[in-house]
Image (cartoon, rainbow, N blue to C red):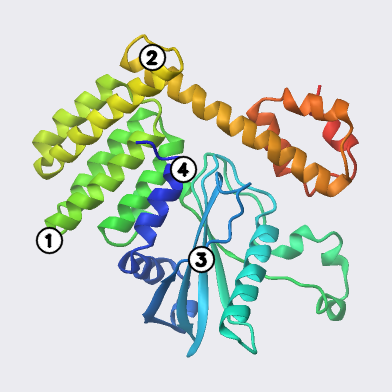
Amino acid sequence: MGIQNPHDKFFKEIFGNVEVAEDFFTNYLPQSILNIIDLETIEPQKDSFINKDLEESFSDLLFKVNINNTPGYIYFLFEHKSYPSKDIAFQLLKYMIEIWEAKVRKEQLNKLPIIIPLVIYHGTERWKASTALKEMINGYDKLPEDVKAYIPNYEYLLYDISRYTDEEIKGEAQLKIFFTTVRDIFTKSSKGAWDSIDRAIAYLKELEDKQTATEYFETLMRYIFSVDKSLTSSDVSKIVKKIETTYPEGSEVVMTLAEKLREEGLKEGLEKGMEKGLEKGMEKGLEKGLEKGKREERITTAIKLLTKKFGPLPEELKSKILKLDAVTLEVIIDGIFDYESLDDVKKYLG
């Protein structure tokens, strides 16, 4: 529904709710951490530490909370690419340093606050990257133990929800709906949307506050309609009819959203010269517009990162980068820390 990054919006709308965050902490944090956290002190922070080059792939949220009777933070990093990043431990370290710098500067602190970092991932590929920074440091494991003490290292908590079964997803209705929906949005076809809606209705019926349930249902449907490009106008009509009978409270919400979807899809299609009806307008016009925008952003990011690492790029190399498809550009960006020279990049340029 005109959402530039529906994953980001869905994540922040759900986890920005203190009750949902507390539900997550209670059900998913290791008991050793839960034992020293005062859940009564959870306080969402407005800060975000994701730079513009990466905001299409990541979202973040920071919560202030008393840890072992001392003010500290829990930092959520939500990765919504379809495959995991290899350098996530390094990225997280940079974000934690930015958090420390911001808090020390604003609050005039003499000591750095505790930060517990965690990553939520829901892509199609299994997460294979190590959760420890040391695995990114060449030769770390071969160092004597007393020398390792001088080398920065830490671990982050990982929640690869793409591998969770329904039984492994715990918590109250809002948290369950979020996890099952983002789990299935990449790993299943349009059936994933149907399954998500069926489960959401079942969970929402458990909520006593019908106003909250309806609002949450609208958030869910906006996310599904925005992300699942396999849904056709016929699918949307079927969803509306199904909800009219199974969840009357949400039928008006879905019909309103469906109408907006039709209008926006048709508008995008017409703007791009795709005047062949609703379905073609949505599937071609909107999809191509978004794809072009993403590709142009990736080109800028790739050139910027390579220039920063190797200095000004040869014009011939720049020209080849400008012709690459979005997938190849993403691969180049993701491997930026592994390249030793521009020759390592040229193998992707054909």
Amino acid on which the number 1 mark rests in the picture: Glu
Q: Which residue is mark 2?
A: 280
Secondary structure of residue under mark 1: loop
Q: CA distance from mark 1 to mark 2?
A: 41 Å
Q: Which numbered disc covers residue 5?
A: 4
Provide residue 174's location: percent of width, then percent of height.
29, 56
Residue nearest the observer in this picture, 70 or 206: 70
Q: Which residue is mark 1?
A: 208
* Sequence-first tag of 3 and 2: 3
* Sequence-first tag of 1 and 2: 1
Residue 265 in view: yes
Q: CA distance from mark 2 to mark 4?
A: 22 Å
* Sequence-first tag of 4 and 3: 4
* Sequence-first tag of 4 and 1: 4
Neighbourhood count class around disc 2 (C-alpha, 10 Å): few under 14, some 14–19, many 20 upward: some
Residue at image x 60%, y 73%? 102
Provide residue 260's location: percent of width, then percent of height.
26, 31
Amino acid on which the number 3 mark rests in the picture: Asp
For the residues carrying marks 1 and 3, which lies nearer the camera in this image?
Answer: 3
For the residues carrying marks 1 and 2, which lies nearer the camera in this image?
Answer: 2
Amino acid on which the number 4 mark rests in the picture: Asn
Q: CA distance from mark 3 to mark 2?
A: 40 Å
Question: Could you say which quadrant of the image residue 271 lies in?
Answer: top left
Neighbourhood count class around disc 1 (C-alpha, 10 Å): few under 14, some 14–19, many 20 upward: few
Q: Which residue is mark 3?
A: 47
Neighbourhood count class around disc 4 (C-alpha, 10 Å): few under 14, some 14–19, many 20 upward: some
Secondary structure of residue under mark 4: loop
Secondary structure of residue under mark 3: loop
